[in-house]
Image (cartoon, grey):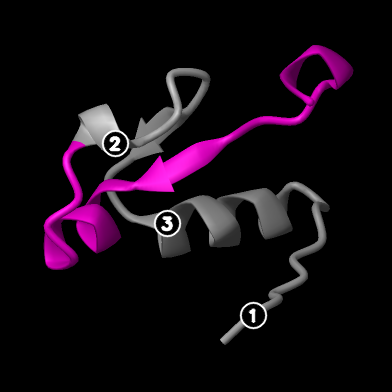
Amino acid sequence: MKMKGVVFVACEFSMSERNVPKEKIIPEADFVKAGIIEIVTKQEQGWSYIKSGF
């Protein structure tokens, strides 16, 4: 998927809340301090956000 332009980003805040170390995240992923800031920033740039799951 990454070769097709998909970007994987993990939220360090959520990871810390759930005790998930970076080593457990796929190596292709990047990290951001707070996912909500990443989402808002992308929406301001014209991206859309679709939430699935819980």
Q: How many numbered circles does the render carry?
A: 3
Q: 39 and 11: which one is in front?
A: 11
Label of residue 21 in the image: none
Label of residue 24 in the image: 2
Give the class, few, some or many, for how many residues have Cα within 10 Å of label 2's Cα (few <14, many ≥20): few
Q: Classify mark 2: helix, strand or loop.
A: helix
- In percent of width and height, residue 30 lies at 44, 27
Quarter assignment of residue 44: bottom right
For the residues marked 1 and 3, what is the alpha-carbon distance in whole angstroms?
Answer: 16 Å
Q: Residue most toward the bottom?
A: 54
**Residues in magenta, as a range:** 1-21
Residue at image mark 1: 53
Magenta stretch contains residue 20: yes
Q: Give the amino acid at mark 2.
A: Lys
**Residue at point 27%, 62% (across, down):** 14
Q: Is residue 25 above or below residue 20?
A: above
- In percent of width and height, residue 35 lies at 42, 56
Q: Earlier in the sequence, mark 1 or mark 2?
A: 2
Residue at image mark 3: 35
Give the class, few, some or many, for how many residues have Cα within 10 Å of label 1's Cα (few <14, many ≥20): few
**Residue at point 71%, 76% (across, down):** 52
Q: 15 and 36: which one is in front?
A: 15
Judge from the rendering whether residue 31 lies leftward or rightward of residue 12; answer left or right: right
Q: Give the amino acid at mark 3.
A: Gly
For the residues marked 1 and 2, what is the alpha-carbon distance in whole angstroms?
Answer: 20 Å
